[in-house]
Amino acid sequence: MEQQNTLTKLKTYARKLKQNLFVLYLSYKDNRVPWYAKLVAICVVAYAFSPIDLIPDFIPVIGYLDDLIIVPLGISLALKLIPAYIIEENKEKAEEIRKNGKPKNWFVAILFILIWLLLTLWIGKLLYGRFH
């Protein structure tokens, strides 16, 4: 019971933090944001808006690592790097975007598909060489 309660709290925290994705989306386009903060924000937003995860959710336990740990940590880091006044300015605009639905990032999705295909080919080649 305790474990389920902790998982529920973690999911709630991650969901709340993910609401800031649209703030990051707007902030990385802002010229007042330092380049290093833009780089982190772009990576986090691209990964979060990708329709395909690097670690698929059907893989037990680690499949949810990106949703519960990696993305929230990335969001948290990016928000710390961006000046507070820019975050505040972008919150209202972000709410409008969020209401209209999140954009899809197909470039990152294609990148993840290529990574999985290359990994599959590599493992297939290893297995073929070992057993043939």
Image (cartoon, rainbow, N blue to C red):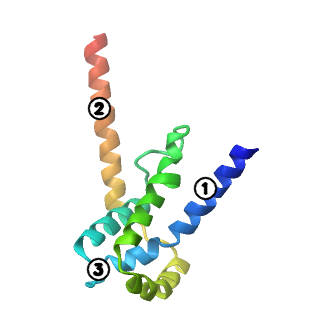
Q: CA distance from mark 2 to mark 1?
A: 36 Å
Quarter the N terminus occupies: top right
Which of the numbered marks, if any, corresponds to residue 121?
2
Q: Secondary structure at mark 2?
A: helix
Circles 3 and 1: CB distance less than 8 Å?
no
Q: Secondary structure at mark 1?
A: helix
Q: Secondary structure at mark 3?
A: loop
Q: CA distance from mark 3 to mark 1?
A: 29 Å
Q: Residue at x 31, y 19 (%)?
A: 127
Count residues near mark 3 (Cα–Cα under 10 Å), then give few for <14, some for 14-19, many for 20+.
Answer: some
Q: Earlier in the sequence, mark 2 or mark 1?
A: 1
Q: Earlier in the sequence, mark 2 or mark 3?
A: 3
Q: How far across and how far down the image is residue 123, in percent?
A: 31, 27
Kind of residue sitting beneath label 3: Val
Residue 47 figure quarter = bottom left
Q: How far across and how far down the image is residue 16, in percent?
A: 57, 68
Residue 105 figure quarter = bottom left
Q: Residue at x 30, y 71 (%)?
A: 37
Kind of residue sitting beneath label 1: Leu
Residue behind mark 3: 33
Residue behind mark 1: 10
Q: CA distance from mark 2 to mark 3?
A: 41 Å
